[in-house]
Amino acid sequence: MNVLGGQNGLVGGNTTDEDQKAIADSITEGAVDVLVDLSSDSIAVRTDSGLVTDGSELYPSPNTADTVYSSDPSLSDESQYVSLVANDVTIVFGSDVGLPRASDITYDDLFAFADPKNNDVDVNFATSSASDSPLLTGVGSNSTDLSGADNNVATVSNPSNGGTAKASVATGTKDGATERLDIGIGEDPTA
C-alpha cells in the first residue's frame, strides 16, 4: 500500500476538507481508494496511537456536510469509513464485542471503493502469514477462497465508485491471531 500525504506520510483527521479532496484526487488519479467500514461494533483499526472504532479520527473525515468523495451518495457518511490507502492501519476483528470462537462471520459491506474517475482497475486481496487459522477467508461477491495456501488472491473486478464488497472471517480458536493482508490495485499483490 502507498501511504499518501500528511505528517510523516500519514493523513491526520485534522486536515481541511480542501486538503482531503486533494488527497482523494491524488489517490484516485489512475487508481481506486479502498476503505474499510467501521460501523460494526466488532470491527476497528489499530494505529500507532491505539485502537480506533470511530473513523472520524482518520482519513477521510470531512469537517462539513460535504464528503471527500461527494459524487457518490453511498459514501455520504464517511465517518464510518477508513481509507486503507491513506492510513497506516491494521484491521481488528472482535474489537468491542468480541467474536465467537471457531465461527464463520460474513460482513456484507466490509470494504468500499472510491473511484470517482472511473479508472477501470481491479482490486486484488491476498492474505498470508496467518499466526493460527486463516482469518480473512473470502472477499467479494464470489467470495474467492483465501483460506488455503499463502498467495491465494480474491479479485473485485472494476469496482464502481461507492461499490462495496462482502468479506468472510473465520475466528479460529486463539485470541489475538494475526494475518497479513496485501491489497493490489490494478496488480497482483503476490507477484
Image (cartoon, grey):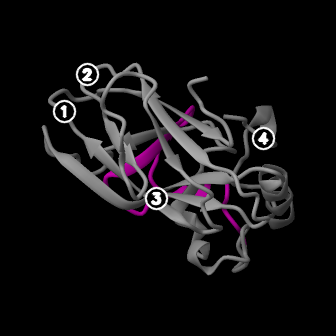
The secondary element bearing badge 2 is classed as: loop
User: Where is the C terminus found, in terms of image quarters?
Assistant: top right
Tell me the distance, in whole angstroms, between the alpha carbons under discs 3 and 4: 23 Å
Start-end of magenta stretch: 38-63
Of the two numbered discs 2 and 1 on the same chain, state the one appearing first in sequence.
2
* Near-viewer residue (81 or 169): 169
Q: Indicate left or right for 71 with 23 as reference.
A: left
Query: Which circle marks residue 165 in the picture?
Result: 3
Marks 2 and 1: CB-CB under 8 Å? yes
Q: Quadrant of residue 113?
A: bottom right
Q: Is residue 60 left or right of residue 28?
A: left
Q: Decide: is 51 above or below 128.
A: below
Task: Give the amino acid type for the residue marked by disc 1 in the picture.
Answer: Gly
Instruction: Compute the Cα span from label 2 to label 1.
Output: 7 Å
Q: Which residue is mark 1?
A: 172
Left or right of 118: which side holds 181? left
* Whether residue 46 is situated above or below residue 162 in the rendered picture: above
Task: Give the amino acid at mark 3.
Answer: Ala
Q: Secondary structure at mark 4?
A: loop
Which residue has dot 4 on it? 4
Quote the CA–CA distance across marks 1 and 4: 34 Å
The x and y percentages for residue 32 are 70, 53
User: What residue do we see at 19% from left, 26% from top?
Assistant: 174
Q: Amino acid at mark 2?
A: Asp
Q: Locate the N terminus and report the quarter of the image it occupies.
A: top right
Marks 3 and 2, how far apart in space?
Answer: 25 Å
Task: Report whether residue 5 is seen.
Answer: yes
